[in-house]
Image (cartoon, helix red, strand yellow):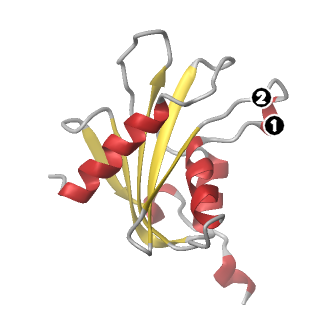
Amino acid sequence: MLDSLEKELILEAMKIRKNSYSPYSKYAVGAAILGIDGKIYTGANVENASYGATICAERSAATNACSRGVRTFTKIAIVGGPNNEGDKHYEFSYPCGICRQFLNEFCSEDMEVIVAKDLEEYRKVKFKDLLAFAFGPKNLE
């Protein structure tokens, strides 16, 4: 069951997804991340003809928060799917490997990750289940 904050995260991810720039993959993703400050930061994927320059929605949301001085996250919601005109089809869109490593810099292993199609169809997992045996800041202390 989703609490009101989790619902808000999903709705914000759905809303920002509309701002995706994804002409190459035709796969639009929105993410909403909850900062330790209690505020929600959003981001959408932004593709580039030089594919390596593409930024995913999760990293877009995290850099949005970081640029405002927030560097600890407690929850993230991700919504994605084909971006055909008028297409409301959403899929469970888990973070890619680069996003998992990037988020590892700023979250605990118990951070909740919510991937959703909508408010009725969603999955919740702990971050540690997405990036087992992670290498992060603690390894460099």
Residue 47 position, x and y percent, is: 70, 30
Q: Residue at x 38, y 70 (%)?
A: 38
Name the one closer to the observer, 14 or 133. Answer: 14
Residue 75 position, x and y percent, is: 39, 62
Label 2 crowd bin: few (<14), some (14–19), many (20+), radius 10 Å: few
Based on the displayed image, in which of its 4 quarters is residue 50 positioned?
A: top right
Kindly give the residue lying farthest to the front in the view shown. Answer: 68
Q: Is residue 122 left or right of residue 134?
A: left
Q: Residue at x 37, y 25 (%)?
A: 90
Q: Which amino acid is tagged 2?
A: Asn
Question: Between marks 2 and 1, how big is the CA–CA gap?
Answer: 8 Å
Report the number of numbered marks: 2
- Tell me, for residue 39, which label it has, or none: none
Residue 131 position, x and y percent, is: 54, 59
Question: On the image, numbered disc 2 is attached to which residue?
Answer: 48
Discs 2/1, front: 2
Label 1 crowd bin: few (<14), some (14–19), many (20+), radius 10 Å: few
State the SS at label 1.
Answer: helix
Confirm or deny contact between disc 2 and disc 1 (CB under 8 A). yes
Based on the displayed image, in which of its 4 quarters is residue 113 positioned?
A: bottom left
- Tell me, for residue 52, which label it has, or none: 1
